[in-house]
Image (cartoon, rainbow, N blue to C red):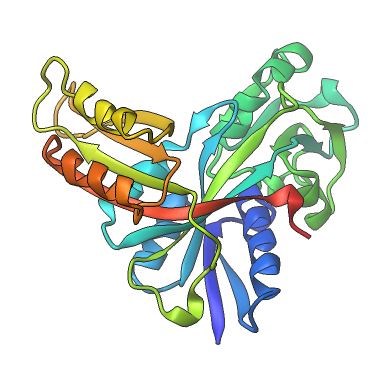
Amino acid sequence: MTLSIAHLGPPGTYTEQAAVFYVNWFSKSTRTEAILCPHTTIPQSLHAVANGQAHLAVVPVENSIEGSVTTTMDTLWQLDSLRIQLALVLPIAHTLISCASNLNKIKTVYSHPQALAQCQGWLERFLPTVEIIPSNSTTEALQRLQQDTTTAAIASSRAAQLYDLPILASGINDNPENFTRFWVVSQDKVDAAYQTTKLPVSHTSLAFSMPANTPGALVKPLQIFAQLGINLSRIESRPTKRSLGEYLFFMDLEADAKEAQMQSALAELITHTEILKILGAYNVLAINTLT
């Protein structure tokens, strides 16, 4: 059997790097082979799993500097058939890749918006006059660098090696403590042969909408978890896209959805929400500890 894993491409992205680490880790305990399937956007990766074109998707969800990857959150809310199986935490170190002879020759810098934002201070200091152009991924622009020596891209050192391109500057992210959390996502009814992990569950992610925007509407759901001693590791709002001022709320909880306390909390939460979705119950692995 072959496990197909969708991810944001082209090859060399940080998401592909997370997927490669996951494949190496997963293959240690199984005889399952895996193939990586790059997609142009994050939603395409998730839709590939929902449509049965891939068994799993590895998608970024949150960066320690720039916060949530909103396209991941919005797409998971829309696709009811998907569930989070595992979280991976990857250290991020950005490099400036270019065929220019020096920084003074660069006129344009390309990268994914998250990477550009994580290097904003460095860009303002060393390349204050360049044009900054967002792209779908950190590696999308790499193939054009050899044709135009006035362009540069922000990507990983691994990407520079894959595309055989020179690095002009390393470690250009503004904060060295730069980490991105990824989710490994499958269909809700995943084949037992493709179960990603038997690790104990440490986190549950959920999302909900409110029946009305009234005073104290969000306080009630928060009190449920506080009273039961369940810690929230993240909470964030996203627009419902139905009307200005209406929001969805995403929560990460440090508990297993199957535990008795969580079951009680979820049963009560239903009475205070319009739509409640359990996005998944899973463990978290730090990639730099995997070998």
Numbered label tally? 0
The answer to whether 83 is drawn above or below residue 176 in the figure is below
Residue 99 picture quarter: top right
The answer to whether any part of residue 40 appears in the image is: no
The answer to whether any part of residue 152 appears in the image is: yes
User: Could you say where residue 157 lies in the image, as x and y percent from the top left?
Assistant: 80, 45
Extreme residue toward the bottom, this view: 1
User: Could you say where residue 15 lies in the image, as x and y percent from the top left?
Assistant: 60, 51
Task: Say left or right for 27 vs 53.
Answer: right
User: Could you say where residue 255 lies in the image, as x and y percent from the top left?
Assistant: 42, 45
Task: Say left or right for 198 vs 205.
Answer: right
Quadrant occupied by the C terminus? bottom right
Q: Residue at x 68, y 30 (%)?
A: 109
Extreme residue toward the right, this view: 101
The answer to whether 207 is drawn above or below residue 50 in the figure is above
The answer to whether 76 is drawn above or below residue 31 in the figure is above
Q: Residue at x 55, y 62 (%)?
A: 199
Quadrant occupied by the N terminus? bottom right
Q: Residue at x 41, y 66 (%)?
A: 48
Task: Say left or right for 161 vs 81.
Answer: right
Residue 224 picture quarter: top left
The answer to whether 21 is drawn above or below residue 143 in the figure is below
Q: Residue at x 70, y 67 (%)?
A: 24
122 or 265: nearer the eye?
265
Task: Say left or right for 258 vs 113.
Answer: left
User: Could you say where residue 52 lies in the image, as x and y percent from the top left?
Assistant: 37, 74
